[in-house]
């Protein structure tokens, strides 16, 4: 069967088209830059609160990582809670962790309120240990979460792991029942529709080229014209551009790639993932995988660190198929039907960030946790903008670091070095 270099999720729904999007107004209360999950969640909330809001998207609405990810709505942050507490102290870590756990509920509430059919389901997630040392770290993390945050997880030793995954290559795991799965393209399309119905104006094919401070706000120049806005919110993730050069220098665009198999028989699908968890491993160069609603194995990872091109997608599909068969030898004769890539937004400290820079609000750096946390933070920063409390958000209370010595201007020349470093860490840790 021929491999399609296209996004499987987007074949399951009708994505927002240019034709149904709003015309450009002359003025707005808030302009949101970025038509993905965080931007649409913010626009939806702002519109519900009676704000005149416009979303500018360089491509089509939902075009980027928001409709290309693995569809995992995860509790927690990219970094483990013990590391976050060592950096920022107990009080702030509690705020961040409670916020991250609450993000899944925020997501669920929007889906239920707007009746978005996106296969949302609480499945829990399964973190897998590639080495015995990883499992020891999971034990410490589980104890820490229970003691300090009253958040219960469940350790699964190697001998019992067959109850969670049909693979023999891991050394144990940790289950968190609070995470969920969904179809991200259906969700982002439904969120866009809900934002429009609430009164938001969505403008596709409208890259923002320049933002000029003006009395009482900002003048934004786009390929589709100009708009004056009292406030601007940047949620453009890994596609953050020279329109906000200071923010662009704080975000690293990292490529992430996914393959999808043909539909699997029910018996085989159940063997691979008995509880249909959102699954990912402990490596720096990690793999993440899950079953879709129609029993496809969705298998992704950092097969290449560079953002997607035709070449990187094809090469990544080859690498990911090898990784998938290593994890699941049962799939060696299964056809791969889809392969695609997307670009994630990583900060240099691997933390999400929100705040104000030169008077412009931002929510960036989700590092692969943008489905739930992007929804939640988009919602929270919308309210904070209206209340004048953006800098009171927990994500604004720690530094937003750039590259050492300032050796980064938005062009990620160092990605091959990062990739090599992470591969080395996977060997020695």
Image (spheres, rainbow, N blue to C red):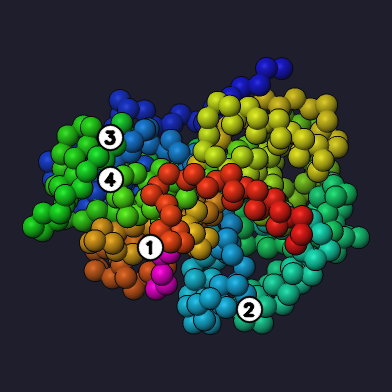
Instruction: Please report contact status of discs 2 and 4: CB closer than 8 Å, yes or no.
Output: no
Q: Earlier in the sequence, mark 3 or mark 4?
A: 3
Q: In terms of secondary structure, where does tag 1 sit?
A: strand
* Distance from Cα at disc 1 to Cα at disc 2: 26 Å
Image quadrant assignment for residue 284: bottom right
- Residue 277, horizontal then vertical, whole percent: 70, 51
* Distance from Cα at disc 1 to Cα at disc 4: 18 Å
| Figure quadrant of the N terminus | top right
The residue wearing badge 2 is 150
- Residue 337, horizontal then vertical, whole percent: 67, 25
| Residue 95 in sight | yes
10 Å crowding of disc 1: few (<14), some (14-19), many (20+): many
Measuring 45% from the left and 39% from the top, which residue is drawn there? Answer: 64
In the image, residue 68 above or below residue 18: below
**Residue 206's mark?**
3
Q: Earlier in the sequence, mark 3 or mark 2?
A: 2
Mark count: 4
Measuring 39% from the left and 73% from the top, which residue is drawn there? Answer: 397
Looking at the image, is mark 3 or mark 4 nearer the viewer?
4
Q: Earlier in the sequence, mark 3 or mark 1?
A: 3
The residue wearing badge 4 is 243
**Was residue 400 drawn as part of the magenta stretch in this picture?**
yes
Q: Earlier in the sequence, mark 1 or mark 2?
A: 2
308 and 109: which is toward the camera: 308
From the image, give the main secondary structure of the stretch colored magenta.
Answer: loop
Left or right, residue 385 beside residue 92: left
């Amino acid at each position: 069967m021929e491999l399609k270099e296209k996004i499987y999720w987007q074949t399951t729904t009708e994505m927002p088209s240019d034709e149904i999007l709003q015309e450009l107004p002359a003025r707005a209360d808030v302009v949101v830059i970025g038509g993905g999950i965080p931007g649409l969640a913010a626009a939806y909330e702002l519109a519900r609160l009676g704000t005149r809001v416009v979303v500018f998207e360089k491509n089509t609405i939902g075009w980027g990582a928001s409709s290309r990810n693995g569809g995992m709505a995860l509790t927690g942050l990219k970094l483990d809670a013990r590391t976050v507490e060592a950096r920022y102290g107990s009080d702030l870590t509690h705020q961040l962790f409670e916020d991250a756990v609450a993000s899944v509920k925020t997501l669920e509430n929007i889906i239920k309120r707007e009746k978005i059919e996106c296969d949302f389901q609480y499945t829990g997630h399964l973190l897998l240990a590639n080495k015995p040392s990883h499992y020891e770290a999971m034990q410490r993390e589980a104890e820490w979460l229970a003691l300090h945050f009253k958040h219960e997880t469940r350790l699964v030793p190697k001998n019992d792991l067959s109850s969670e995954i049909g693979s023999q290559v891991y050394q144990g795991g940790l289950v968190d029942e609070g995470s969920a799965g969904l179809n991200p393209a259906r969700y982002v399309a439904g969120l866009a529709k809900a934002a429009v119905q609430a009164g938001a104006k969505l403008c596709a094919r409208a890259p923002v080229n320049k933002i000029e401070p003006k009395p009482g706000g900002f003048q934004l120049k786009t390929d589709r014209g100009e708009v004056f806005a009292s406030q601007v919110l940047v949620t453009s993730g890994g596609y953050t551009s020279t329109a906000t050069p200071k923010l662009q220098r704080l975000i690293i665009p990292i490529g992430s790639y996914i393959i999808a198999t043909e539909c699997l028989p029910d018996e085989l699908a159940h063997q691979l993932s008995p509880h249909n968890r959102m699954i990912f491993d402990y490596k720096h160069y990690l793999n993440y995988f899950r079953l879709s609603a129609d029993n496809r194995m969705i298998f992704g990872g950092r097969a290449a660190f560079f953002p997607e091109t035709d070449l990187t997608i094809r090469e990544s599909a080859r690498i990911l198929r090898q990784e998938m068969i290593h994890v699941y030898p049962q799939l060696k004769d299964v056809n791969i039907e889809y392969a695609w890539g997307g670009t994630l937004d990583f900060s240099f400290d691997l933390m999400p960030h929100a705040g104000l820079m030169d008077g412009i609000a931002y929510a960036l750096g989700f590092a692969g946790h943008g489905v739930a946390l992007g929804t939640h933070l988009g919602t929270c920063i919308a309210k904070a903008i209206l209340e004048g409390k953006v800098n009171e958000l927990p994500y604004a209370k720690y530094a937003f670091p750039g590259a050492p010595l300032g050796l980064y201007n938005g062009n990620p020349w160092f990605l091959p070095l990062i990739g090599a470093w992470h591969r080395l860490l996977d060997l020695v840790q």
